[in-house]
């Protein structure tokens, strides 16, 4: 089964369209080269065609990640390609990680940052485009590429994209080629192997950062955190906390979106929503422990989601929000260390840092503040 992330399917469609435009015969698969790997992967293509008297081309494929709960499963992908005459192309990165010969456009259904209008696309996705399209580029030409997801806007409504400031569609923030089930035992084993490898390196300084999901990874890297010290945990936070202690980690930073990490403050250490939620109940409990006004506690408990509760509190009682999320960050640190000590005796320092729906670092526990200060990051007040 072809179990690849969305960027791989996008690049395959773009490569197919480019091959057709430069005169190569249509193939129902494309071979995609990967960064830092000798092997390539084979990706199916549904169809392609020349348009506008051969001036443009279009290729179509359908994302198949192999994950039954993946929002991108079966997503239709269109890639429009046009070649333009260009001079003095060097292949250098000129803007937003794109090379100067690639004019990328986020078309209908592709997510953009609301603050800037720029496409929400990871460096991994850009690198895939660069590696696979540049060898096909005719001399003296540049490529204009437009990606369209016909169902992208509708499917994005079922994601947390808007919470991260991404609008108009699905983002392209995959960090790897192979799709992974974040709640599966295989994902846990993969993460444990990555953790063991990092901890066995000669440069290991006993410090690591755990991020949950692609948005956490993307933001962490954009803020300058070293990729060599980051592990994307998926939803297996608890067992990986124990594995970190077992492998000699002394300082561990939990970095993520509050909508995920809130579960840890309530003692839930496998964060997939199909296994356990309870976020509103946890939020209500945190408000009670902070002595928040009863009317505000009632507002929280009657909200349809944590996000809606936070929005309502932000507009009516911002100081209450600060107290609640400050308490949550502290509880994450306390309960995480308690979880580890259920299985082994550890003095590992666990810090928590949380970012909000605008992708801004907002809250941190006592140890989290120390750790982000040492990394040179800024906590928004």
Image (cartoon, rainbow, N blue to C red):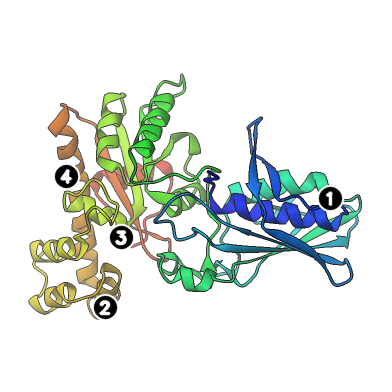
Between disc 2 and disc 3, whose residue precedes?
3
Between disc 1 and disc 4, whose residue precedes?
1
Q: Of circles 1 and 4, which is in front? A: 1
Q: Quadrant of residue 77?
A: bottom right
Residue pointed to by mark 3: 259
Between disc 3 and disc 4, whose residue precedes?
3
Q: CA–CA distance between discs 2 and 4?
A: 27 Å
Residue 114 visible in image: no
Q: CA–CA distance between discs 1 and 3?
A: 43 Å
Q: Under tag 3, what secondary structure?
A: helix
- In the displayed structure, 185 sits above or below 305; it is above
Q: Of circles 1 and 2, which is in front? A: 1
Q: Which mark is residue 137?
A: 1
Between disc 1 and disc 2, whose residue precedes?
1
* Other residues around mark 4 within 10 Å, as few (<14) / some (14–19) / many (≥20): some
Q: CA–CA distance between discs 3 and 4?
A: 17 Å
The residue drawn where x is 48% and y is 34% is: 228
- In the displayed structure, 341 sits above or below 22; it is above
The residue drawn where x is 47% and y is 53% is: 219
Q: Which mark is residue 312?
A: 2
Nearest the viewer among 106 and 369 is 106
Mark 1 and 4 residues: CB-CB less than 8 Å, in contact?
no
Q: Of circles 3 and 4, which is in front? A: 3
Q: Of circles 1 and 3, which is in front? A: 1
Between disc 1 and disc 3, whose residue precedes?
1
Residue pointed to by mark 4: 335
Mark 1 and 2 residues: CB-CB less than 8 Å, in contact?
no
């Amino acid at each position: 089964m072809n179990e690849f992330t969305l960027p791989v399917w996008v690049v395959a469609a773009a490569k197919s369209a480019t091959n057709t435009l430069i005169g190569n015969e249509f193939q129902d698969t494309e071979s995609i080269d990967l960064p830092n790997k000798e092997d390539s992967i084979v990706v199916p293509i549904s169809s392609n065609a020349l348009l506008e008297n051969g001036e443009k081309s279009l290729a179509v494929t359908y994302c198949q990640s192999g994950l039954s709960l993946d929002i991108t499963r079966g997503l239709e992908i269109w890639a429009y390609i046009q070649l333009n005459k260009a001079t003095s192309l060097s292949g250098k990165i000129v803007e937003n990680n794109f090379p100067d010969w690639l004019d990328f456009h986020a078309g209908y259904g592709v997510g953009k940052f609301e603050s800037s209008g720029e496409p929400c696309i990871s460096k991994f996705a850009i690198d895939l485009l660069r590696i696979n399209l540049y060898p096909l580029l005719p001399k003296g030409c540049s490529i204009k590429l437009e990606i369209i997801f016909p169902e992208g806007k509708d499917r994005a409504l079922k994601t947390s994209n808007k919470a991260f400031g991404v609008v108009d569609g699905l983002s392209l923030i995959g960090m790897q080629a192979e799709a992974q089930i974040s709640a599966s035992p295989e994902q846990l084993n993969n993460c444990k192997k990555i953790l063991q490898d990092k901890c066995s390196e000669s440069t290991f300084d006993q410090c690591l950062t755990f991020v949950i999901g692609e948005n956490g990874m993307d933001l962490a890297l954009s803020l300058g955190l070293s990729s060599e010290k980051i592990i994307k945990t998926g939803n297996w936070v608890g067992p990986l906390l124990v594995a970190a202690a077992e492998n000699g980690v002394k300082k561990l930073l939990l970095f993520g979106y509050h909508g995920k990490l809130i579960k840890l403050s309530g003692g839930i250490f496998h964060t997939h929503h199909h296994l356990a939620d309870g976020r509103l109940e946890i939020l209500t409990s945190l408000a009670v422990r902070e002595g928040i006004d009863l009317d505000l506690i009632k507002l929280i408990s009657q909200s349809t989601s944590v996000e809606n509760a936070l929005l309502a509190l932000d507009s009516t009682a911002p100081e209450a929000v600060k107290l609640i999320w400050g308490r949550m960050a502290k509880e994450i640190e306390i309960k995480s260390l308690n979880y580890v000590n259920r299985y082994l005796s550890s003095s590992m320092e666990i810090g928590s840092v949380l970012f909000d729906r605008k992708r801004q670092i907002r809250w941190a526990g006592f140890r989290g503040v120390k750790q982000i200060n040492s990394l040179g990051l800024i906590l928004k007040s």
